[in-house]
Image (cartoon, rainbow, N blue to C red):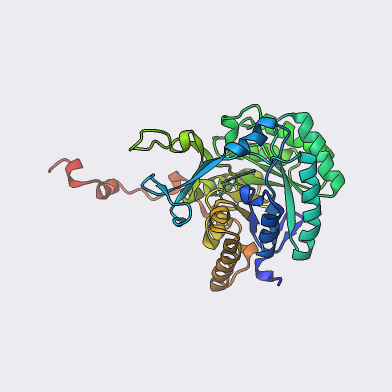
Amino acid sequence: MNNTRLNISLGTLPLKNPLICGSGEHLIEEAGILKALEFGAAAVVAKSTNESELARRQLDRTDYSIVGQDLKQQDWRKDKGLNTSLFGRSGLMDTDSKEWLSTIARLDGKARKYHSYVVASLIPASMSFLIEHAEIAQKLGIRVLEINIGAPHGIEASRDIRLTFDPKKANETIREVRKVFHGHLWAKTTGMSESISQLAFASKEAGADAVVMMGRMMALIPNLDSMMPVLGTKGAYGGRWALPITCRWLSESRHLLGSKYPLIGTNGARDGYDIARMMLAGATAVEQTSAIFTGGFEVIKENIKQLEGYLKEKEMNALDLIGITSDQVQSYAEQELRPGYWRQFVSDDALNKK
Ligand SMILES: Cc1cc2nc3c(=O)[nH]c(=O)nc-3n(C[C@H](O)[C@H](O)[C@H](O)COP(=O)(O)O)c2cc1C
């Protein structure tokens, strides 16, 4: 059922609500993509692909762990609270990329029935593959293409998953794709940079219709008992703790790129209220992955319901949320001068006795 309160527009792309199911392992098989559509996601980003045999084989070396606030591994089946983090190493689609794009095109056709989209996702390895496959996506009639220029695993597998930190390089990459793909083009940036807004700006200038921000962080978690690294390696790390950092970048980017340009938030949004938080910071829509990967597809329905409840309570439409908080951010210099105020925050021992 269409609920106009939730409708938003990502530039010229209408979305029935702001929840996008972000790319991950639960979207490797058709069943998962269809479930995400059924449960009401406005768009579903299929698992990413590229030509690299190593990145493909990496799918057989993946592992995932839920980590609590005490930094201990928790039971995958039981502990999926809002305050846990997801740590892991991922790989890319293990089927042939052309075949995968054909499947996505077919599923994108099915998505029309749900007033939704199935988005293809390419992670650059070589430029020639990227362009060839963007062209294929165009020929197949895929309506939305996401280019992830910031996959965190690129740090560990640099030749096979190209991670772009340089805005000039981001511009070149997106510009080349733009020449051959005429549907909606989204660029997804890294979260491990002080140039996230510049990467977004460069992608906008190159012709991206929206920018998705931001990728997860690479991390290492020592296990105190074994003294070994959790999962034996470094891995990508994300949790709700990342939401305020994503919100900061959404806000910075809104100011740099302009309030009309659509940003998509990702990294840290766990429930429907978190979708609202990212929208208040400047996102038009939000990609949720970990919450759905670990919690199942019902999470989509629950989160949309929560967002709708919040909007009803505030007597607002989703569209009206975008950027409200961001537009009221003041500089440090604008804050009230309060000499000695800091004294209230330190223990008595830290203060010179009078
Ligand atoms: C297990 C796992 C696999 C992922 N695979 C992909 C992928 O293939 N392509 C991609 O662009 N992002 C991938 N991501 C990143 C997510 O789409 C998302 O941007 C990120 O996890 C932050 O959002 P979240 O806090 O909602 O999880 C993956 C994330 C996880 C946890």
Residue projecting furthest to the front: 60
Which residue occupies the foreground of this view, 181 or 80? 80
Image: 232 above or below 115? above
**Count of numbered labels shown in the rendering:** 0
Q: Which residue is drawn at 62% across and 43% down?
A: 256
Is residue 351 visible in the rendered image? The answer is: no
Which residue occupies the foreground of this view, 230 or 345? 230
Q: Going by the image, does 192 lie left or right of 110?
A: left
Is residue 278 visible in the rendered image? The answer is: yes
Residue projecting furthest to the right: 139
Residue 179, picture quadrant: top right
Image: 170 above or below 208? above
Q: Going by the image, does 303 lie left or right of 45?
A: left
On the rendered image, what quadrant is the C terminus found in?
A: top left
Residue 353, picture quadrant: top left
> Picture coordinates of residue 209 (x, y %)?
74, 47
> Picture coordinates of residue 89 (x, y %)?
55, 39
> Picture coordinates of residue 330 (x, y %)?
49, 50
Residue projecting furthest to the left: 354
Q: Which residue is drawn at 69% across and 56% down?
A: 31
> Picture coordinates of residue 277 (x, y %)?
53, 57
On the rendered image, what quadrant is the N terminus found in?
A: bottom right
Which residue occupies the foreground of this view, 241 or 172? 241
Image: 111 above or below 95? below
Q: Going by the image, does 265 lie left or right of 16?
A: left
Q: Residue at x 57, y 53 (%)?
A: 293
